[in-house]
Image: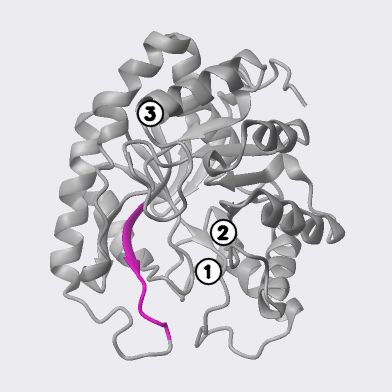
């Protein structure tokens, strides 16, 4: 589906986003990053080491990082840390207030991880929990999630993950929220889409993260169905996680071909960097400032300033606009 020109700046003028500090008008967004992490925890969430860190130090590091992004013109970040990998919305709100960068945070569960909040609940109860975080707030804070994030094993969803995916689709459909999926493998992503569509979820609110790992044809086929695509390894010249094209030249070539194919309204970029990771030995080397500091100018030279702004601002706003039914 080659999108019409309906998603223009004029159409986005009344659009709003749900951030950790409240509702944000799209008019206020200068530049945006579609997939980042201020803090991520890879310890199992049912173990004592989970989120056992010096939060003062972590918040300080995140504020410093966000301030650099702000100085480069970025004032909106979609933060993809959800339940099970260290989400801390109070810390994220503190970072936002100190850096003047707005953050959209998710509900949803990361893969088949044990969660003290959602252990042994039904699919309907899990969906209700996601809806509550979107409609009311997270952990009694009043800070509301702005979208749903899900994921599964790269080889395919386990039985428990199928339940999580179904709950996410139910919640997204019920609220009109965006549904982001961590899915480097195209075949797995297609199977996940089938699960979600059975729940009545529509792909015009679907965001496929790590889409650059799959082929150009896979990207186009998913975009033809209405989905948004994220190329979120900008600056990761050797992606130790998923592979795929990550050099600037390879990413620019992919972007150029997608724009030439008429998909400029459905592409987003980010670095998928994590400022702080627990345990620290899992920290990976990515710079979330690389996109704005270096890659943005290269992209302007390749596809022009107007299309670059669309990819680095308008599409992020369109994809992650606040849930439409709340």
Disc 2 vs disc 1: Cβ atoms closer than 8 Å?
yes
Upstream in the sequence, badge 1 or badge 3?
A: 3
Query: In front: mark 2 or mark 1?
Result: 1
Q: Tell me what residue is drawn at x 59 percent, y 37 percent.
A: 229
> Residue 289, located in which quarter of the rendered image?
top left
> Residue 290, located in which quarter of the rendered image?
top left
User: Mark 2: which secondary structure?
Assistant: strand
- Measure the alpha-carbon separation of dots 1 and 3: 27 Å
Q: Tell me what residue is drawn at x 50 percent, y 25 percent.
A: 311
Residue beneath label 3, please?
A: 31
Q: Pick the residue in front: 283 or 204.
A: 283
Q: Tell me what residue is drawn at x 24 percent, y 35 percent.
A: 70
Q: Tell me what residue is drawn at x 32 percent, y 39 percent.
A: 237
- Measure the alpha-carbon separation of dots 2 and 1: 8 Å
Give x and y (percent) for residue 7.
Answer: 65, 22
- Horizontal arrangement in the rendering, residue 96 relative to residue 210 (left or right): left
Pointer 3 local density, CA inside 10 Å: few below 14, some 14–19, many at least 20 = many
Give x and y (percent) for residue 149.
Answer: 56, 59
Q: Pick the residue in front: 310 or 132.
A: 310
Q: Give the range drawn in magenta.
A: 37-45
Q: Pick the residue in front: 53 or 231.
A: 231
Residue beneath label 1, please?
A: 110
Disc 1 vs disc 3: Cβ atoms closer than 8 Å?
no
Q: In which quarter of the image is the N terminus?
A: top right
Query: In front: mark 3 or mark 2?
Result: 2
Upstream in the sequence, badge 2 or badge 1?
A: 1
Residue beneath label 2, please?
A: 149
Pointer 2 local density, CA inside 10 Å: few below 14, some 14–19, many at least 20 = many
């Amino acid at each position: 589906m080659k999108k019409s020109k309906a998603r223009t700046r004029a159409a986005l003028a009344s659009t709003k986003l749900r951030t950790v500090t409240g509702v944000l008008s799209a008019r206020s967004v200068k530049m945006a990053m579609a997939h980042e992490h201020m803090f991520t925890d890879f310890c199992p969430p049912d173990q004592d080491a989970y989120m056992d860190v010096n939060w003062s130090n972590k918040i300080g590091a995140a504020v410093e990082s966000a301030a650099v992004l702000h100085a480069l013109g970025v004032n909106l970040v979609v933060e993809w840390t959800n339940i099970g990998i260290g989400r801390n919305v109070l810390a994220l709100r503190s970072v936002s207030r100190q850096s003047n960068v707005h953050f959209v945070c998710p509900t949803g569960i990361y893969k088949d991880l044990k969660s003290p909040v959602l252990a042994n609940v039904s699919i309907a109860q899990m969906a209700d929990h996601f809806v509550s975080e979107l409609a009311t707030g997270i952990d009694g804070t009043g800070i509301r999630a702005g979208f749903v994030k899900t994921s599964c094993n790269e080889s395919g969803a386990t039985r428990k993950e199928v339940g999580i995916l179904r709950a996410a689709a139910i919640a997204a459909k019920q609220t009109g929220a965006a549904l982001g999926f961590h899915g480097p493998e195209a075949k797995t992503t297609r199977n996940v889409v089938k699960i979600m569509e059975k729940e009545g979820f529509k792909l015009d609110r679907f965001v496929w993260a790590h889409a650059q790992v799959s082929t150009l044809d896979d990207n186009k086929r998913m975009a033809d169905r209405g989905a948004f695509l994220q190329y979120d390894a900008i600056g990761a010249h050797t992606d130790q996680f998923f592979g795929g094209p990550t050099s600037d030249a390879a990413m620019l070539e992919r972007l150029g071909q997608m724009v030439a194919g008429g998909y400029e309204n459905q592409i987003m970029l980010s670095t998928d960097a994590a400022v702080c990771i627990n345990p620290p030995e899992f920290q990976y080397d990515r710079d979330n400032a690389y996109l704005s500091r270096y890659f943005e100018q290269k992209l302007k030279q390749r596809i022009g300033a107007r299309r670059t702004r669309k990819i680095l601002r308008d599409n992020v706003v369109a994809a992650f606009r606040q849930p439409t039914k709340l």
